[in-house]
Image: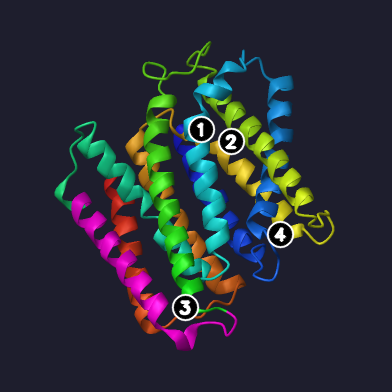
Amino acid sequence: MWLLFTFLTTITWGVCEVFYKMGAERSTKYTHLRTGIFIGLVMGIHAVITLITKNTGFHPINLIYYFPVFFLYMLSMILACYGVRFIENSVSSVIEEFSSVITASLCFFILGERISGIAAFAMALLTIGVVLLAMFETRDENNTPKDVTKKMLIVGIIMAMMYALLDGIGTFLDVFYLDIETSPLKYVTENTIEDVANIAYEISFFITAIIFYIFLKIKKEKFTFKGEKNRITTGILETLGQAFYVYSFSGNDIIAVAIMSFMSVISVVLSRIFLKEKLTKKQYVAIVMALVGVVILGIVGE
């Protein structure tokens, strides 16, 4: 079943990235926090449903123990949502997939896991593609919207890279948290550990959403549900992906991480179809180079 959940996670989050972009209007102040509110709201609802319908034995202390993983994921998500306002989703999603290189590198240097030559080549290809894509994105002023400055482009690139770093570390930590033998979570069993981790994540995000809402109220920013179809959809897809995600680590962790790197392929294709994104030839070359690295990683399962 873990393989099925891995594929569901990949598809759901690949589609979700498109809605992130659709809800990230440059003209809307604190758009990233608004998106975070809807994500937290949907996750809170799902957490309550899980608590009512499943006997998970969830203990509130796990909100504290799981907080490091939650914080890394949440912060990476908010930063990416902030940065995608200024760059194309096709560019952002590919740069964000560099997180798989971060995770693999941590597994190699810290856990001493072996990486095959072809996997190392794939990671190098992905790295070069991401670097070139960042360079082309900030230098090609002819392909940039008139209301986006070069400074904004750089911010967008940096935010995508910060996502890759934080998400990569978070994924690395999740390998420990979702393993019953190494997990610091309390009062869990092999049958409940995924649900407990997910509930802790979702409740934490719900609390964060409340904090974001209070911040907007302090800033006297108007907040309504009207015209928020894209952000609501983002919240639903993000929550579904998260629910699938925790179960994907109940099998082969390395293969799960590799398969999920395919979500960038889905995101790029959908961005071209539905967002009508137009990139330069150089950017397409860099994207193809990076995606080839992603595909190889997925095939070799490392």
The answer to whether one can see residue 8 in this image is no
Q: CA distance from mark 1 to mark 2?
A: 6 Å
**Mark sitting earlier along the chain (4/2):** 4
Image-quadrant location for residue 176: top left
> Residue at left 62%, top 32%?
204
Report the front residue among 10 and 278. 278
Q: Secondary structure at mark 2?
A: helix
On the image, numbered disc 3 is attached to which residue? Answer: 150
Q: Dot 4 lies on which element?
A: helix
Question: Which one is closest to the eye, mark 1 or mark 3?
Answer: 3
Provide the secondary structure element on which disc 1 rests: helix
- Within 10 Å of disc 2 (Cα), the crowding (few <14, some 14-19, many 20+) is many
Q: Indicate the position of residue 81 as horizontal and vertical percent values.
A: 57, 57
Q: How many marks?
A: 4
Quadrant holding the C terminus: top left
Of badges 3 and 2, nearer the viewer stands: 3
Nearer-N-terminus badge (3/4):
3
Q: CA distance from mark 3 to mark 2?
A: 38 Å
Q: Main secondary structure of the magenta part?
A: helix
Marking on residue 230: 4
**Which numbered tag is attached to residue 246?**
1
Q: Which residues are magenta?
A: 119-147
Query: With respect to residue 158, does 288 lie above or below?
Result: below
Identify the residue shown where x is 53% and y is 73%: 272
